């Protein structure tokens, strides 16, 4: 396993993460490890679009997709 070190975190940010970890009954290291792992498991929009394009799906850019979603929502 690799290690990650984050420097220059503000006191406020540190306090928030420490408080949230304590509320979950975890150390901050355990809590942040869980958050980082979950985040890494979720693909970004760009990654999803790249998969769709790789599979020969529609070649739409982000703005076109957003416009289609808005149009669909507005039609309801």
Image: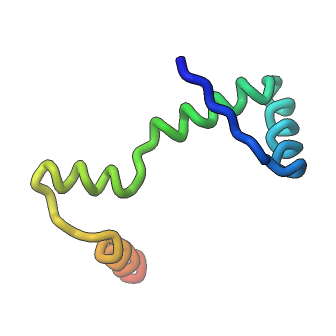
9 above or below 5?
A: below
Seen in the image, is 2 located left or right of residue 42? right
Quadrant of the image occupied by residue 29: top right
Q: Nearer the viewer, residue 31 or 6?
A: 6
74 vs 28, nearest the viewer: 28
Q: Residue furthest top?
A: 1
Outermost left residue: 56
Determine if residue 72 is in view.
no
* Apparent side of residue 62 relative to residue 29 in the rendered image (left or right): left
Q: Residue furthest front?
A: 7
Please state if 16 lies on the left or on the right of 63 as rendered.
right
Q: Nearer the viewer, residue 7 or 69?
A: 7
Q: Which residue lies at the image location 78% right of the left edge and 29% below the top edge?
A: 28
Residue at screen point 34% across, 70% down: 62
- Locate the C terminus and report the quarter of the image it occupies: bottom left
The image shows residue 23 at horizontal and vertical percentages of 85, 33
Residue 25 coordinates in the image, percent (x, y):
82, 24
Q: Looking at the image, is 76 positioned above or below residue 19?
A: below
67 relative to 14, above or below: below
Q: Going 18% across and 56% down the picture, which residue do you hit?
A: 53
Residue 10 rendering spot, x and y as whole percentages: 84, 51
Residue 21 visible from this viewpoint: yes
Q: Is residue 12 above or below residue 33?
A: below
**Residue 27 placement (x, y as % from top left):** 80, 24
Colour mapping? rainbow
| Marker count (numbered) | 0
């Amino acid at each position: 396993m690799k290690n990650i070190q984050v420097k220059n975190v503000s006191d406020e940010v540190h306090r928030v993460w420490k408080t949230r970890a304590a509320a979950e009954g975890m150390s901050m290291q355990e809590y942040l490890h869980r958050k980082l792992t979950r985040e890494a498991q979720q693909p970004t929009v760009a990654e999803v679009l790249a998969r769709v394009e790789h599979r020969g799906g529609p070649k739409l850019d982000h703005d076109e997709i957003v416009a289609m979603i808005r149009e669909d929502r507005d039609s309801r």
